[in-house]
Image (spheres, rainbow, N blue to C red):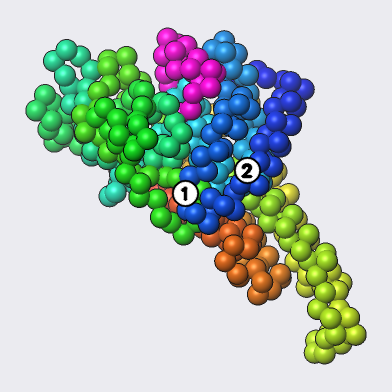
Amino acid sequence: MLKHDLTDEDFEPYFRTAQEVSQFFREIGPRYDAENTFAVPSIEAFKKSGLGALPVPKEFGGAGGSLLHASKVITELSRGDSAITLAYNMHYIMVGIAGGLMSEEQNKYWLGRVADGDLMFGPFSEQRAGFSGLADMKAVPQRDGGWRLYGKKTWGTLCEAADIITTNATITDAEGNLPEDFEARIAAESFFIGDFTVDADGNGDGLRIEKTWDALGMHATGTHTIHFDGYYVPADGFICQWRAGAFGVLEWASLMFASIYLGMQQRVLEEAVATLAKKRLGATFGAIVAADTEVAGVGHIIDGVGELASRVELSRRVLYRTCEEVISGRDADWPVELRFPYIGLAKTFIADNVLYMTRHAMSMVGGSSFRKGAIFERLYRDSAASMFQPLNADQSRTYIGQFLLQSARPQG
């Protein structure tokens, strides 16, 4: 098991750096949201900050930051700009997942590169598959060793900045045929790592970026389709069997996504308080009769802001407590089948809260929040992404419900 032994005291400078980077993200975010393009200036800022090496163990040249430390950094960065942060969130997810599954030799090389400033990403989803579908992408064995990958992945978040790629593909026979037996196909689905080198047009050796990102929100994330056309992975680029390994480390996915939306909740509260504290309605006649009405003195506004603050605090406690339970090993007390969905409850809880908060904040602020380019309009759009990252609420309930009902069925 990797050591994440950074002390809270030694973490403080990293958090201060995160606050500085967060402010930079906040400044540049509106432009790249409007342009619907990846925030290229963020690459230098993030690499220069050294934050990418935070979760890399000290033995491989990193800071040794824990799951909780990474969560706090992502939360703070997201408070500046959630869309930009969502891109770098992929780096933290894949460093955590790959680092927990690679051999010591692989970690020394790949995490050593991360410690030196390289960025890692991981496209896994396929058009028909989503999270739970087995990979149709093929890893065809080569005579001299290694594999060539063929297929495409639809969610290549951070691809415009990454140096290292991780992905899953199903190992075929020498002719490129997928296993026909279901159990054999599960066993053949594998996790790979390799260099990600593309030119200015997104073309590389056996792979390319197709710029397809055009979504409701999270514009500055730059999430594109990655095509594999014979991309070569040497033998030492094989990490492990994907399904057997992934479910033991997927907390790095669900809890990092949760951190994105906790930071967004904090931004919603911040912007709502700043706007409503100074807003005046002038003379009003109706439910409120006054010569000059200050919104901050209206009952439902007071209660509404209090509710937003309460939701932020509850989300913070749920997320950070979940991180602490995973770090301390208390998740070992849960049924192994429920480990991932139980960890994911933090994400689904926070996702529900951020969706509610953005809508309610817009209602309290009024029609100006509906104008394109307004911070509330952007937060409303960006918050919608919280419904989709795995596990979402429906997937979590299905996993939990199936396990409980199957366990309670009479045997024999």
Q: Which mark is residue 37?
A: 1
Determine the main secondary structure of the stretch shown in magenta. helix
- Residue 400 visible from this viewpoint: no
Location of residue 162 in the rendering, given as x and y in whole percent from the top left corner = 44, 31
* Mark 1 surroundings: few (<14), some (14-19) or many (≥20) residues within 10 A: some
Residue plotted at (78% across, 73% down) = 300
Location of residue 382 in the rendering, given as x and y in whole percent from the top left corner = 54, 55
- In terms of image quadrants, where is residue 238? top left
- Residue 241 visible from this viewpoint: yes
Residue plotted at (20% across, 36% down) = 182
Location of residue 152 in the rendering, given as x and y in whole percent from the top left corner = 27, 40
Left or right: residue 380 compared with residue 17: left
Of residues 288 and 371, the one drawn nearer to the viewer in this rendering: 371
Badge 2 is on which residue? 25
Of residues 344 and 129, the one drawn nearer to the viewer in this rendering: 129
**C-alpha distance separating marks 2 and 1:** 14 Å
Left or right: residue 209 compared with residue 338: left
Left or right: residue 58 compared with residue 11: left
Mark 1 or mark 2, which is nearer the start of the sequence? 2
- The residue range painted magenta reads 101-120
Of residues 411 and 130, the one drawn nearer to the viewer in this rendering: 130
Residue plotted at (36% across, 23% down) = 195
Name which residue type carries label 1.
Thr
